[in-house]
Amino acid sequence: CGHKGLGVIMGPFTRHTGLAVSLDRVNVDTDQIIPKQFLKRIERTGYGQYLFFDWRFLESGQPDPEFVLNDSRYKGASVLITGRNFGCGSSREHAPWALQEYGFRAIIAPSFADIFRNNCLQNGILPIQLAEGQIAQLSTKAKEKPEGYEITVDLELRSISDSDGLFIYFQIDEFRRYCLLNGLDDIGLTLIKDDKITEFERRKGII
């Protein structure tokens, strides 16, 4: 379903507990997240299978056993821990679409490209910016726990926690936090004022 047929409704993000995976790379651009040859689709779905395609697969088409997402320990991971300047390059919105469809709900990094961060927020993905030391701590746990590393991201508390007692606060713009908590993208924010818009259009003779 969508905003009166205009798009996919963005679900609210309040509290998420999931398996974390560490992609220990910096300057990951949007062409690496979703390569350009897969952008011909007219829908905004179907991109998850192509996420990190050039890294996930060998030239033969077989999964690359060296790439972290092909490790069975991280099957079903929904929190991505990665390096600085994540999402740089082109402004394609397909990148968060692919990440979301693959299953990621939150991305934790020292920094993000501005347009990519905004596109994530518009699509219900929570981009969390932390200090390098905190990222290293989370990344080490994700790599070293043989049973998998599960963390909880709580947007209401602005916190990240785990079963070992770790507790980290993160910062987020209050307006963006409000939108995510309520599942509101730009269209959703506009539709909140639907009655006023309709009344204005009636007065102006538009409808």
Image (cartoon, rainbow, N blue to C red):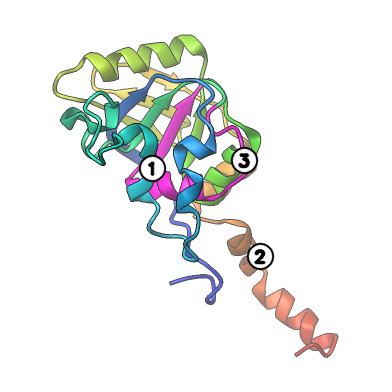
| Residue for badge 2 | 190
SS for dot 3: loop
| Residue for badge 3 | 90
Residue 2 point in image, percent of width and height: 48, 70
Q: Is residue 154 above or below residue 84?
A: below
Residue 128 point in image, percent of width and height: 50, 30
Is residue 40 within the magenta segment? no
Residue type indicated by callout 3: Ser
For mark 1, does the 10 Å Cα neighbourhood hold few (<14), some (14 to 19), or many (20 or more) residues?
many
Real-space Cα distance between discs 1 and 3? Answer: 16 Å
Residue type indicated by callout 2: Thr
For mark 2, does the 10 Å Cα neighbourhood hold few (<14), some (14 to 19), or many (20 or more) residues?
few
* Whether residue 181 is visible: no
Q: Quadrant of the N terminus?
A: bottom left
Q: Nearer the viewer, residue 19 or 175?
A: 19
User: Does residue 165 appear to the left or right of 145 in the view shown?
Assistant: right
Real-space Cα distance between discs 2 and 1? Answer: 31 Å
Q: Nearer the viewer, residue 205 or 141?
A: 141
SS for dot 2: helix
Q: Nearer the viewer, residue 47 or 124?
A: 47
The residue segment tinted magenta is 86-109
| Residue for badge 1 | 51
Residue 159 point in image, percent of width and height: 43, 28
Is residue 104 within the magenta segment? yes
Decide: marks 1, 3 in contact (CB < 8 A)? Answer: no
For mark 3, does the 10 Å Cα neighbourhood hold few (<14), some (14 to 19), or many (20 or more) residues?
few
Q: Is residue 137 above or below residue 71?
A: above
Give the number of marks.
3
